[in-house]
Every structure is written in C-alpha cells, then in structure tokens.
Image: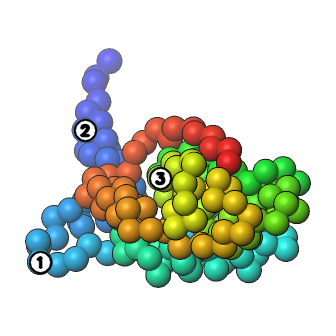
Amino acid sequence: MPSRTYVPTLAAALTAAVTLFGGPAHAQADAPADQPLAARVVTYDAGASAEFRAAVDRGAAIWNESVDNVELRPAAAGQRANIRVLADNGWPRALTTSLGNGTVYIGRQAVTQGYNTVRIAAHELGHILGLPDRKPGPCSSLMSGSSAGVPCTNPYPNAAEKAEVEDNFGAALARPAATAPREVMIVD
C-alpha cells in the first residue's frame, strides 16, 4: 500500500490555525518598537443582564477609558461573545475560563443590600480582565469589592489595577492565544 504525505495539508491547516487564532498577536509582536500595539477586543453579551444592562455598559466603558491594551465591546447580533453577563438572585461573581473570557453574574443580593450596580459590574469585569479580589481594601480600590462597604460607589480601577490589566493584555498581545482554557470561579 503506498504511503501518502500529509505535510502540505498539515502545513495548510497550521497556517489557517495561526491566522485564525494567533495571527493578530503574532503580527503585533513583530510590529516595530515605535508602533503601539492595537488593543485586544473582548466582546460581551449583556442581553441577559436584565435591569443591569446600563450598569454593565457603563462598567465596560469605564474599563475602556482606563486601559489601552484591551477594549470591551458589545457583541454584534449573532456573534459569540467572550463574556456573558447574566442577572441572578445570588451574590455577584465571575467565572473566568481564560483571560478575557468567562461569565459574569450581577447578583441582586448585593444590589438589595445597597451596593452600587456600576461598581459591581466594573469589579466583576475586572475579574475577567485578570484581577483578583483585594480584600479588605479601601474604596479607592475597585477590586476591594464589598469590603469597601455599601457607601462606596467608586467604579474606577486605581493605578495599580490599571497597570495590572495593561500588563495582562500587553503580554497576551505579544503571544498567541492559549489553547486550553482554565476555569477559575471568583465569588465576591
């Protein structure tokens, strides 16, 4: 039985995979040093966020105002989003599958207790952008979450939080996307 060579087919498949999954990051890594890298676009679907839709959109806008290496955009109709945002009756939380990917729950329990919805949305999106909780913490730290208390309405990341997200996505822009997602559940 004659043997067949699959090298051209394999090479074509690898080229397609690099173009689809690693092409932009690879091309950006090869960009001249004086040319800034383009932001990585992360899409979100807030269609199931119910009464929190405006808070989610504002939380995303705050991150867009605060960092350059990642941009949060609403997913287009029919587009699979990197982030799903859901409303439920529990406590707010984020399930991160990989950097820039996961599910955010805007829990009504915290809202009922008086916590600010925009701060909740920005905080939970911060988890998807790679930030951990920093409890206890002051109101000036977005990732201090509920430990800052109900009176805290600050939805903006501080300088250290901004720098960490910039580093997270700066490194992500410089290498191809990971192939195996990891699951991390962060409950605030």
Q: What element carries label 2?
A: helix
What residue do we see at 32% from left, 59% from top? 167
The answer to whether residue 101 of the structure is visible from this angle is no
Mark 2 crowd level (few <14, some 14–19, many ≥20, 10 Å Cα)? few
Q: How far is the residue under mark 3 from the one under mark 1?
A: 27 Å
In what element is the residue under mark 3?
loop
* Residue 97 sits above or below residue 44 on the image: above
Residue at 68 percent across and 44 percent down: it is 187
In the picture, measured across the screen, residue 26 lies left or right of residue 98, that is left
Residue 115 visible in the current orientation: yes
User: Which label is found at residue 127?
Assistant: none
Residue 86: give x, y in percent of width and height: 77, 60
Q: Say which of marks 3 and 1 sits in front.
A: 3
Looking at the image, tell me whether mark 2 or mark 3 is earlier in sequence order.
2
Residue 57 place in picture, x, y as percent: 66, 78
Q: Residue 169's image quarter? A: bottom left
Q: How far apart are marks 1 and 2 (CA)?
A: 38 Å
The quarter of the displayed image where residue 185 is located? top right
Q: Quadrant of residue 127?
A: bottom right
* Residue drawn where x is 40% and y is 45% of the image: 178
- Asked if disc 2 and disc 3 are in contact, CB closer than 8 Å, the reply is no
- Few, some or many residues within 10 Å of mark 1 (<14, 14–19, 20+): few
Report x, y in % for residue 55: 71, 76
Q: Which amino acid does label 3 sit on?
A: Gly
Residue pointed to by mark 2 = 7
In the image, what residue occupies the spot 85% across and 74% down? 51
Callout in the foreground (2, 3): 3
Q: In this view, does 48 lie to the left or right of 143?
A: right
